[in-house]
Amino acid sequence: MKKEILDAQGLACPMPVIQTKKLLVNNDVVETIVDNFIATQNLEKMATQLGYNFAVKEEAKDKYIVTISKGEVTEGVVVDTLCDTCVVPVTQAIRVLEEETKVTLLVKTEDSVESLRKFADKNSYEFKVSDIEGGFKVEITKEEGPQLEAVPVVKDDSYIVVINKDQMGHGSEELGKRLIKAYLYALGEQEVLPKKIIFYNNGGVLVDKTRSHVIEELKILEDAGVEIVCCGACIDYHKIDLALGNPTNMYFIVEDMRKANKVIQP
């Protein structure tokens, strides 16, 4: 078994994730040392997406040792959120099921179970729940479709929207705030809605409970099935209290933008 130790203390997001992922190509186990809790969350999300085992140990206030190892997965990908209130179960389930046919989630509250049940019902996935010590074990399985002969990939008209300011355009701040509100309203009226809206930097203020002036427009979009996410580092920096949507990180922001058919920035 090949093992590598990576000292990622002092490295900014998403470098610990990128370097750890590179080391996992040629190693069975990678121990990554980081100096903040957000970095451990980002590494956990990466491990979950890849179907690898994950463990974290807090050595000191500013020192965490994350161990990621390859191994046989018997229950599909397992996401343990029992000790981590920052991990959003539904978001993790969506990401895992993009690549896998089954995900097992360990959750602490009945609210999390109900959110996962609604997600499974909406997508016609098989759903099972059982009691475990300290919470619940939820298993979600999607049926594999028949293997079809490969055909050329045709780009569809899907798109994502990225917003990095609390206003639209440059110049008058008052006008800019009116414009971004009008833009989000018009976005909700489109025949084809965006798959996702990503907020980062000052744009994160638009999902804050007390500082946003566009919650109503965003709620309409979210209720229509648009996924709303906000950069986790931006949430911390701007002290954002999320009114809706879920936190994400730079690794997934880059991945979402890279994979998107079209990226629109107002």
Image: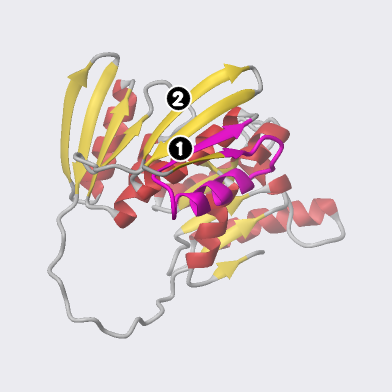
**Left or right of residue 218: residue 13:** right
- Judging depth in this view, the residue of 41 and 137 nearest the camera is 41
* Res 172 quadrant in image: bottom right
Let me know if residue 238 is in the magenta part. no
- Judging depth in this view, the residue of 95 and 8 nearest the camera is 8
| Gap in angstroms between the C-alphas marked 2 and 1 | 11 Å
Residue at 52%, 63% (x, y): give it.
160
The colour mode here is: secondary structure
Q: Which amino acid type is shown beneath numbered disc 1?
A: Glu
Image location of residue 68, percent across then percent down: 43, 38
* Residue span colored magenta: 6-34
Residue found farthest to the bottom: 152
**Left or right of residue 203: residue 16:** left
- Badge 2 density bin: few <14, some 14–19, many ≥20, Cα 10 Å: few
Quadrant location of the N terminus in the rendered image: top left
Residue at 48%, 66% (x, y): give it.
259
Query: Mark number for residue 159?
Result: none
Q: Could you tell me which secondary element the residue under label 2 belongs to? A: loop
* Res 8 quadrant in image: top right
Residue found farthest to the front: 1
In the image, residue 210 above or below residue 224 = above
Image location of residue 40, percent across then percent down: 53, 33
Query: Mark number for residue 44?
Result: 1
Query: Mark number for residue 84?
Result: 2
Residue at 63%, 48% (x, y): give it.
15
Marks 2 & 1, CB-CB < 8 Å contact: yes
Label located before the other in sequence (2 or 1)? 1
Q: Which amino acid type is shown beneath numbered disc 2?
A: Asp
